[in-house]
Image: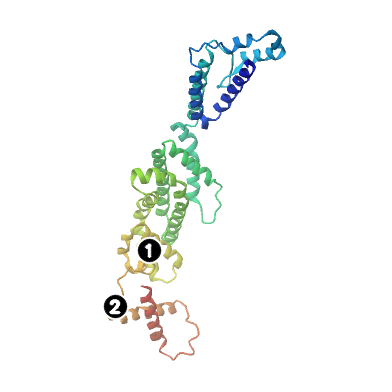
Amino acid sequence: MEEESMEEEGGSSSSSYEAMMDDQNHNNWEAGVDGYRQQHPAGHAQAPLGDRALQLPADRKGHRGQQQEEEAQMVPEANGLMKGCDSAGAAGKGGAVAAAIINTSTSKFLMNVITIEDYKSTYWPKLDSAIDQLLTQSPGDYIPISYEQIYSCVYKCVCQQHSEQMYSDLIKKITNHLERVSKELQASPPDLYIERFNIALGQYLGALQSIVPLFIYMNKFYIETKLNRDLKDDLIKLFTEHVAEKHIYSLMPLLLEAQSTPFQITPSTMANIVKGLYTLRPEWVQMAPALFSKFIPNILPPAVESELQEYAAQDQKLQRELMQNGFTRGDQSRKRAGEELTYNGSSACASSRGYR
């Protein structure tokens, strides 16, 4: 019976060592320690483990008895250190196991803590580099960054209560970038101003399609819950304040001039800028309603029958301007002479009213 008791004690100590290495079983082992204390109170008259081993009869001890004596003197404790059994008995040993488990779990938790120094030296530099690449990428460029790694950095920083600092760093980073973009636009010549503004606007809105999802965890658990705002709205507001507002009064006259000269700039560039300005601030429609109405539906009031002749005259004028700039209308041999403008003016009028 003493030999079986010795084996049970050795197995229990080994199990305690394994449980210590897995903090997921921490609660189960605390319950086990409490049960052990109830079964072996401190005042129990049972002899210590080493004494019981020495009380075995001489004819039964032999080689195995000596081996058990050695094992009893070097029992592996829960903290991974070899320690001999003392005279405190099983109750004292159970308390040591519980204390070791608690201390180990605490040390593991402290090892996973991200301090503000860790955030500044390790985590934010990774985010800073990724944001730089996203803000300066061209359409179709390959960016050698790991989206999973960046998302993981954001997740860990939010869990460690660094959301406020991370949001502040993100806003400061993008603000500095937009201020540089604004200065570059101010130095642009008039013939390149519209095209460069279009590139800056498209590049920024494209970058937001990657930046906002990467910081979605911060947006959900900090910006939306504590600031009652949305990250995408905040970042669009940054471009409006630091770029668009500073250039709108220089940009709009150039857009109106380009509109009066067909194909001075490509239709796609004009459409991108007008739609982008409308996204940034819909109130800017009032600066040029006719221009915005060509790309944004329902800007102008609905057409009325009394103005149909005026609409037809505007369409005929546009056709004449196109022909004067070298645009032909194709084969007109099957139409009667003198009716092409009237016929096409009426059809164009009907189609343009439907677009409204």
Indicate the position of residue 106 as horizontal and vertical percent values.
Answer: 48, 26
Residue 292 appears in the picture as rendered: yes
Mark 1 neighbour density, 10 Å: few (under 14) some (14–19) many (20 or more) = some
- At 44% across and 49% down in the image, what residue appears? 212
* Dot 1 or dot 2, earlier in sequence: 1
In-front residue for pair 329/27: 27
| Kind of residue sitting beneath label 1 | Leu
- At 46% across and 49% down in the image, what residue appears? 213
In-front residue for pair 309/38: 38
Q: In the rendered picture of this protein, how many numbered marks are placed on residues?
A: 2
In-front residue for pair 268/155: 155
Disc 1 element: helix
Q: Quadrant of the N terminus?
A: top right
Q: Pick out the residue farthest to the front.
A: 1
**Of circles 1 and 2, which is in front?**
2
Q: Which mark is residue 304?
A: 2
Q: Quadrant of the C terminus?
A: bottom left
Q: Which mark is residue 254?
A: 1
Indicate the position of residue 142 as horizontal and vertical percent values.
Answer: 56, 52
